[in-house]
Image: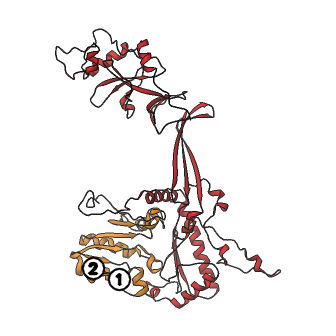
Chain colours: A orange, B red
């Protein structure tokens, strides 16, 4: 099973210090690498070690589950380039940021700083339903 | 995305997937936030809130760091240049005290240090209304964070929403979820389809939770008098003619007219199919001037007549222009025409019929008038 490389802590991690929430099976956890947010060195090391088996790198561009922490431009850039080099997908978790930080989501902000920046997959929620439960995922046709 | 169902093998579906209410809600929200200047105003409000928090903290000598983007914000009790690691080790005891102190003053923050905050688009800057508690003569305390429930940023209620009347819906952003039942907006928007035809979209929205939408088309009668049409959709055929779709089917409407008239489909051979309404899809399928000529999907020509107008004499094409089958009967004509003693027609001879249409249809006949007399104009409202 391919490995996900996640640099996105959830509230569970931040609040309780668990790498995941109780109830998530070990089998799932072991296929996920959790990295420190904005730690470019750790990210590059993870890709150097496990690059071939990494399916995707998931990042919350502005981590709203640990208050309000922006992914640094270098770390976003490194995520995109490392993922592209390893043939992995870059997944932007815009559940919280989508349509809140701007019409184009957080990815539009990063695209201003990083030329040609675009995640392969994006997931949205919350605002897109206008208060109703709804969660789309988006990807380019490519 | 092609890997996902229904295109691909990855099953992705659910009972509420694409739920109509949720999607209507989402669409209303997206429309609202796509308005020009929306995010500028929202970001300015959020920045003002964070700046106020930081200024208050600084005035009190409390180390605090805050940031915002769009309508999203956060703050820590930490030094301004804190790294992520330090942020995660921030002073939670202080946050807890702050949370409860704010709650006592009527401000309900997210009850955890690790939650981001959101400012509603409907929020506005509170006013210092602490007069009641202030003794006369004593200057008002400088409140950067307004104290008291009535002074906090709150969703607009209908009473204060007169300026919002023309808004499609109040976008609910997190904090403002409480506004769900309070903001009811009604909006109409006119758009000119043609100088003499307008479209009016009206929508009623209940706090961004959906509502009803209605589209009404009207045609100009005099200067600024408009007549409402019973139409669902309009296809502009040319500057003076539109194709109207309503509950009576398709109809033509011309400049200056208030009553659209129905199409009737008449077979080229002359057997009028009275109750068949032409399914004309657009300008390319309807030849308007000087007569109305229509080809259906099988390239069979039909003359399209218009009620209350001089009807084309479709039954008597010029002698010599009748199709000659040479003894064959391609595209055998409907039995009714044959039974009526009319010659079968090869409807595939499009050029022939086009040329026939040019002259033979000029003369209206009383017979056709009778046929057309049954057409009902689109009712007035």
Please tell me which residue lies in front, A4 or B85: A4
In the displayed structure, would residue B41 be above or below residue A75? Answer: above
Q: Is residue B362 left or right of residue A1?
A: right
Looking at the image, residue A127 lies above or below residue B335: below
The answer to which quarter of the image holds residue A70 is: bottom left
Q: Residue furthest right?
A: B137
**Left or right position of B272 against B240:** left
Residue B285, located in which quarter of the rendered image? Answer: top left
Q: Secondary structure at mark 1?
A: loop
Circle 2/circle 1 CB separation < 8 Å: yes
- Could you say which is closer to the camera, residue A50 or residue B134? B134
Residue B116 in the image: state x and y as whole percent. 49, 76
- Residue B27 at what x, y percent from top left? 46, 56
Compared to residue A83, the image places residue B236 above or below, namely: above
Q: Which residue is mark 2?
A: A28
Residue A20 - label: 1
Q: Position of residue B376 (x, y in %)?
A: 48, 27
Q: Is residue B48 left or right of residue A37?
A: right
Q: Point out the image quarter for the N terminus of chain B.
A: bottom left
Label 2 residue SS: helix
Label 2 packing within 10 angstroms: few (<14), some (14-19), many (20+): few
The one nearer the camera, B107 or A103, is: B107
Q: Pointer 1: residues within 10 angstroms few (<14), some, or many (20+)?
A: some
């Amino acid at each position: 099973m391919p490995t996900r490389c996640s640099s996105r802590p959830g509230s569970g991690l931040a609040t309780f210090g668990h790498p995941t929430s109780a109830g998530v099976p070990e089998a799932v956890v072991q296929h996920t690498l959790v990295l420190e947010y904005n730690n470019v060195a750790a990210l590059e090391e993870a890709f150097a070690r496990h690059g071939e088996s990494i399916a995707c790198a998931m990042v919350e561009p502005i981590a709203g589950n640990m208050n309000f922490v922006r992914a640094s431009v270098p770390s976003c850039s490194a995520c995109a380039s490392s993922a592209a080099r390893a043939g992995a997908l870059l997944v932007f978790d815009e559940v919280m940021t989508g349509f809140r930080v701007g019409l184009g989501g957080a990815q539009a902000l990063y695209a201003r700083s990083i030329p040609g920046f675009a995640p392969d997959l994006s997931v949205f929620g919350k605002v897109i339903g206008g208060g109703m439960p709804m969660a789309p995922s988006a990807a380019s046709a490519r | 995305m092609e890997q996902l169902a229904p295109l691909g093998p990855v099953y992705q579906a659910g009972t509420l997937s694409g739920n109509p209410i949720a999607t209507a809600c989402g669409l209303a929200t997206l429309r609202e936030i796509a308005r020009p200047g929306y995010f500028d105003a929202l970001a300015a409000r959020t920045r003002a809130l964070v700046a106020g928090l930081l200024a208050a903290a600084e005035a009190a000598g409390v180390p605090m760091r805050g940031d915002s983007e769009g309508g999203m914000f956060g703050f820590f009790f930490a030094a301004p240049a804190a790294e992520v690691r330090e942020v995660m080790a921030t002073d939670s005891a202080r946050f807890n005290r702050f949370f409860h102190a704010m709650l006592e003053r009527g401000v309900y923050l997210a009850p955890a240090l690790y939650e981001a905050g959101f400012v509603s688009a409907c929020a506005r800057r509170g006013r210092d209304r602490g007069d009641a508690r202030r003794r006369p003569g004593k200057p008002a305390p400088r409140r950067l964070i307004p104290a008291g429930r009535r002074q906090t940023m709150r969703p607009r209620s209908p009473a204060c929403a007169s300026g919002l009347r023309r808004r499609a819906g109040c976008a609910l952003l997190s904090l403002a979820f409480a506004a769900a039942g309070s903001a009811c907006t009604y909006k109409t928007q006119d758009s000119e389809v043609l100088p003499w035809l307008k479209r009016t979209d009206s929508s009623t929205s209940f706090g961004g939770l959906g509502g009803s939408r209605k589209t009404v088309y009207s045609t100009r009668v005099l200067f600024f008098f408009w007549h409402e049409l019973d139409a669902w959709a309009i296809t502009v055929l040319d500057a003076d003619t539109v194709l109207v779709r309503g509950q009576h089917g398709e109809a033509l409407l011309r400049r200056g007219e208030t009553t659209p008239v129905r199409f009737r489909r008449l077979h080229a051979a002359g057997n009028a199919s009275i109750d068949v309404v032409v399914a004309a899809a657009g300008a390319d399928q309807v030849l308007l001037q000087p007569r109305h000529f229509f080809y259906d999907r099988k390239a069979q020509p039909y003359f399209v007549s218009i009620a209350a107008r001089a009807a084309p004499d479709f039954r008597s094409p010029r002698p010599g222009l009748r199709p000659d089958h040479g003894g064959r009967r391609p595209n055998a004509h409907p039995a009714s025409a044959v039974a009526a003693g009319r010659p079968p027609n090869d409807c595939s001879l499009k050029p022939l019929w086009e040329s026939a249409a040019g002259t033979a249809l000029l003369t209206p006949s009383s017979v056709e008038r009778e046929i057309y007399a049954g057409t009902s104009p689109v009712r007035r409202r």
